[in-house]
Image: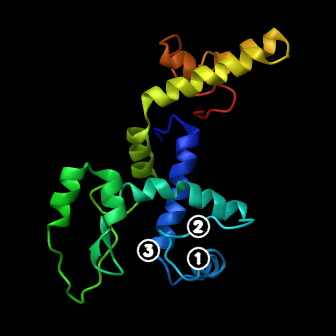
């Protein structure tokens, strides 16, 4: 499937549910979540709330991925989304965007996803977008902190080393051996599947 990072893939899947909340607002599940978590506002302005369900907390966490890739126009007021524009663009570009006048026609706006040509969210396009947004320096710092914590743990060295090997794809499974050009196939011999 081409998904290398399972955590990012999971966030892309959760963002798909958020996209569903935005585009299918008349469905029963969306109306239930709206009545419980954001009855007087929109999905964009919804708060996490007190004692949220695991599902709502997960979808809420993936909302940021959607925010970064949708249109900059507030569909309710048919004006520029000033907060989003200020967050995304520098001051000069933000002022230039605000000078562009918008149509106030009665036609309903349609939510579009910038991550692919169809304008509809897909897990694959969400995953690609999330990969582009990830800061390599932040990843390196997080990994460094993780290793320091790992080596400071009071556990046997062989467990520390095995964990380190696992985190760096040094476990000799078929997929890793294939990537290092040691094996001719990435398929697991016992189960016949890709990892």
Of the numbered discs 3 and 1, the one sitting upstream in the chain is 3
Q: Secondary structure at mark 1?
A: loop
Are there few (<14), some (14-19), or many (20+) residues within 10 Å of tag 3?
some
Q: Quadrant of residue 170?
A: top right
Q: Above or below — where is 91 with respect to 27?
A: above
**Residue at x 20%, y 87% (from the top left corner):** 105
Gap between marks 3 and 1, in whole Å?
16 Å
- Asked if residue 70 shows in the view, the reply is no
Residue picked out by circle 2: 47
Residue picked out by circle 1: 38
Q: Secondary structure at mark 3?
A: helix
Residue 20: x, y in percent? Answer: 49, 69
- Asked if residue 176 shows in the view, the reply is yes
Q: Above or below — where is 33 with respect to 70?
A: below
Circle 2/circle 3 CB separation < 8 Å: no
Q: Above or below — where is 58 with respect to 33?
A: above
* Left or right: where 24 falls relative to 77: right
Q: Residue furthest bottom?
A: 106
Looking at this view, is 50 or 107 the one in front?
A: 50
Of the numbered discs 2 and 3, the one sitting upstream in the chain is 3
- For the C terminus, the quadrant is top right
Task: Kindly report which numbered mark, 2 or 3, lies closer to the viewer in this rendering.
Answer: 2
Residue picked out by circle 3: 23
Looking at this view, is 149 or 87 the one in front?
A: 87
**Residue at x 32%, y 52% (from the top left corner):** 88
Circle 2/circle 1 CB separation < 8 Å: yes
Are there few (<14), some (14-19), or many (20+) residues within 10 Å of tag 2?
some
Gap between marks 2 and 3, in whole Å?
19 Å
């Amino acid at each position: 499937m081409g998904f290398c990072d399972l955590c990012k893939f999971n966030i892309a899947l959760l963002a798909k549910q958020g996209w569903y909340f935005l585009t299918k607002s008349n469905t029963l599940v969306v109306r239930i979540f709206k009545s419980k978590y954001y009855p007087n506002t929109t999905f964009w302005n919804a708060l996490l709330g007190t004692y949220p369900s695991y599902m709502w907390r997960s979808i809420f966490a993936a909302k940021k991925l959607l925010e970064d890739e949708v249109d900059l126009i507030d569909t309710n007021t048919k004006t520029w989304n000033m907060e989003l524009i200020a967050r995304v663009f520098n001051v000069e570009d933000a002022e230039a965007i605000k000078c562009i006048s918008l149509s106030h026609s009665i036609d309903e706006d349609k939510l579009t996803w910038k991550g692919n040509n169809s304008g509809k969210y897909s897990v694959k396009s969400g995953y690609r977008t999330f990969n582009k947004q990830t800061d390599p320096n932040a990843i390196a710092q997080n990994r460094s902190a993780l290793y320091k914590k790992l080596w400071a743990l009071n556990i046997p060295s062989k467990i520390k080393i095995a964990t380190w090997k696992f985190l760096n794809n040094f476990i000799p499974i078929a997929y890793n051996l294939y990537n290092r050009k040691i094996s001719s196939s990435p398929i697991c011999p016992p189960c016949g599947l890709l990892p």
